[in-house]
């Protein structure tokens, strides 16, 4: 992929959508906002193409914008959805939605809008895509059910072709979300926000869009790099292939085609990439990829993508301590805990520029990794990490964390005695389904090098089984079974949380078979008047009055961390990228208007960790 294309793969649809939409919208007042709030176009918010890893030319339409909404009791079907306008894709509780109301498990959130299809959709299958909706979603087109989806963090789609009638189409979406009164994955949302727990997020919070595809089309594909054998393996899923149809894959290095191959059923291939340019934070090189279906020499369907050649693994060093290797070399991984919250959009960045901001600042500060903390981001966020060159540790959002129904595992030597929570069969099933969907949706992003199924024993259950399943599903990445949680001798990592000073697990823990990481530390707070969620009762794990005091303490932490690397530490995560609600321990204020410590100074300080 050309360097000039980094940050600008923003595919604007040339198709048009026609719908009646009021501009009667304004930001809910009362909280701090980011600089991007004032730049939002309510007629066309977040207009960028939402799926950079699988691009079609121009056969898509964004449905983001102002919809009608209503909040009604769960046993009530509204005669009219007319409480006002909500700005999609911002959650109902957010300021940017224009609503700013809590929904609660007692109510459903209803959405309604109409649309007409452009001429490019004629004769095509009509797919309705949702980037993410929290939590239970039921969709109706022209009064008939298109489908139901449960999950707050994974993308989903419905084929609505058979439901299309006439010129104007009616779309109704019903959402129910129990927040922390249910067992579903919900991250840090609670009904009573305080401390490290934040405002609920209900409803649509990522882009909604239509896509028009031919009857015979590419459904999805999975790509995995193998640098040792200089190849990219692909598994391609298609629909309605006819006899004689040809599936072709091709790779480009900048403008030069470097590999091409025909793929036969079951449509799995190994594309040779000779002398590959290896992807790393220092050199985030991306190759271009194209997959086509041809019939008698004519292209029936085509998708464009990209890939990177990189490898993540663990291996013992000369002293027998397991080290995390990137491309067969030890690279210390250091990055911030990234919650991904916004004071105006909650789960949703106000604009695509805002979405890039935190990542770009993280890189400027000299970090080479981000731990995406119990949240999943839109696909474009991972694209920017791929492009900029940031390693990502991906958490599974926690759920079912209340109560104390734990089953002790006797005889296990651990930092905290290994225990698994007893969850109901339904609770387990919901977790497994969404974790499977999340890992599927994010598999093709080379930036992700590590999966984290559990955080701090929050809802942690059947640790060995879940860890082994994750490792078998994706052997190309590492698995950190329980970051700072209840520890078991499973997975590739043992992960300690320690505040505020850095520390590390004992090198001999579990027979020295796992790499040692510090999954959270720091939390140094600096509240700045005018840039906080509330003016009183803010906190950090240790608070300071000015930048000079904060920097002095931070520099000492980095010096201490360097000594731990020499003793066997492979990675560390500093809390955190930005302030979040009443937490003021971010390197950047919650409104993204002040970077508390100089990017250049932090970059200089961090370099000693990589030498």
Image (cartoon, rainbow, N blue to C red):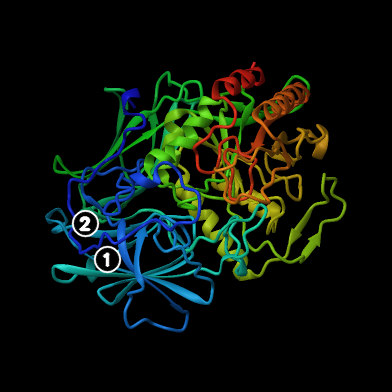
Q: Is residue 292 left or right of residue 345?
A: left
Residue 597 image point, x, y percent: 60, 28
Which numbered mark, 2 or 1, is in the foreground of this view? 1
Residue 98 image point, x, y percent: 39, 60
Helix, strand or loop for disc 2: loop
Residue behind mark 1: 160
Mark yes or no: residue 247 visible: no
The quadrant of the picture occupied by the N terminus is top left
Residue 138 image point, x, y percent: 39, 71
Q: Is residue 308 left or right of residue 477?
A: left
Single out the residue that lies furthest toward the right: 411
475 up-or-down from 273: above or below: below
333 up-or-down from 13: above or below: above
Residue 362 image point, x, y percent: 53, 31
Mark yes or no: residue 595 visible: yes
Residue 81 position by quadrant: bottom left
Q: CA distance from mark 2 to mark 1?
A: 13 Å
Single out the residue that lies furthest toward the top: 611
Query: Relative to the observer, which residue lies in front, 258 or 444?
Result: 444
Residue 250 position by quadrant: top left
Query: Relative to the observer, which residue lies in front, 603 or 520?
Result: 603
Q: Residue at horizontal 15%, vertical 56%?
A: 118
Q: Residues within 10 Å of mark 2 (few under 14, many from 20)?
A: some
Q: Is residue 528 left or right of residue 130?
A: right
Instruction: Tell me the number on the disc at residue 215.
Output: 2
Nearer the N terminus, badge 2 or badge 1?
Answer: 1
Q: Residue at horizontal 70%, vertical 64%?
A: 402
Q: Is residue 285 left or right of residue 544?
A: left
How many marks the image carries: the answer is 2
Helix, strand or loop for disc 1: loop
Instruction: Tell me the number on the disc at residue 201.
Output: none
């Amino acid at each position: 992929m050309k360097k000039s294309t980094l940050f600008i793969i923003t595919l604007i649809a040339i198709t048009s959508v026609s719908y009646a939409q009021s501009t009667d919208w304004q930001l809910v007042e009362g909280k701090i906002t980011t600089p991007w709030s004032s730049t939002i176009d309510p007629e066309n918010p977040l207009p960028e193409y939402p799926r950079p890893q699988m691009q079609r030319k121009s056969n898509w339409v964004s449905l983001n914008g102002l919809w009608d909404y209503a909040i009604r009791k769960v046993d009530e079907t509204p005669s009219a959805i007319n409480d006002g306008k909500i700005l999609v894709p911002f959650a109902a509780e957010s300021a940017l939605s224009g609503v700013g109301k809590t929904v609660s498990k007692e109510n459903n959130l209803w959405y309604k809008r109409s649309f007409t299809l452009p001429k490019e959709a004629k004769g095509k299958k009509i797919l309705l895509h949702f980037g993410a909706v929290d939590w239970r979603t039921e969709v109706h087109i022209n009064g008939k059910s298109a489908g139901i989806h449960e999950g707050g963090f994974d993308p989903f789609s419905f084929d609505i072709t058979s439901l299309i009638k006439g010129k104007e189409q009616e779309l109704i979406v019903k959402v129910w979300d129990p927040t922390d009164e249910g067992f579903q994955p919900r991250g840090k949302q609670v009904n009573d926000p305080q401390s490290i727990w934040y405002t609920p997020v209900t409803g649509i919070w990522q882009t909604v869009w239509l896509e028009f595809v031919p009857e015979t089309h590419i459904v999805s594909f999975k790509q995995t790099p193998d640098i040792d054998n200089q190849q990219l393996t692909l598994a391609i899923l298609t629909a309605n292939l006819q006899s004689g149809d040809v599936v072709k894959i091709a790779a480009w290095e900048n403008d030069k085609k470097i590999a091409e191959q025909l793929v036969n059923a079951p449509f799995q291939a190994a594309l040779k990439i000779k002398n590959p340019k290896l992807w790393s934070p220092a050199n985030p090189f991306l190759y271009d990829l194209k997959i086509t279906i041809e019939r008698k020499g004519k292209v029936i369907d085509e998708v464009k993508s990209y890939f990177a050649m990189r490898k993540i693994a663990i291996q013992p060093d000369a002293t027998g301590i397991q080290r995390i290797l990137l491309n067969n070399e030890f690279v210390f991984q250091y990055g911030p805990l990234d919650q991904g919250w916004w004071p105006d959009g909650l789960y949703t960045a106000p604009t695509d520029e805002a979405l890039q901001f935190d990542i770009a600042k993280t890189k400027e500060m000299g970090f080479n990794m981000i731990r995406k903390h119990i949240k999943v981001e839109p696909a474009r966020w991972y694209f920017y990490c791929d492009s900029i060159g940031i390693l990502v540790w991906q958490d599974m959002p926690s759920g079912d964390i209340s109560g104390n129904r734990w089953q002790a595992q006797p005889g296990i030597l651990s930092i905290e005695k290994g225990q698994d929570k007893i969850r109901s069969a339904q609770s387990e099933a919901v977790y497994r389904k969404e974790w499977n969907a999340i890992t599927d949706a994010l598999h093709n992003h080379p930036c992700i090098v590590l999966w984290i199924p559990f955080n701090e024993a929050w809802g942690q259950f059947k640790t060995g089984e879940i860890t082994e399943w994750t490792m078998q599903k994706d052997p190309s990445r590492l698995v950190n079974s329980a970051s700072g949680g209840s520890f078991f001798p499973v997975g590739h990592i043992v992960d300690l949380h320690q505040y505020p000073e850095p520390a590390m697990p004992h090198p001999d823990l579990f027979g020295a078979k796992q790499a040692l990481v510090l999954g959270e530390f720091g939390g140094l707070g600096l509240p700045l008047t005018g840039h906080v969620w509330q003016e009183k009762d803010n906190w950090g794990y240790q608070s300071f009055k000015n930048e000079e005091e904060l920097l002095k303490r931070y520099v000492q932490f980095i010096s201490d961390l360097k000594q731990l690397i020499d003793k066997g530490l492979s990675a560390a995560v500093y809390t955190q990228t930005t302030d979040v609600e009443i937490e003021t321990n971010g390197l950047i204020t919650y409104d993204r208007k002040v970077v508390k410590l100089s990017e250049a100074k932090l970059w200089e300080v961090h370099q000693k960790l990589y030498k």
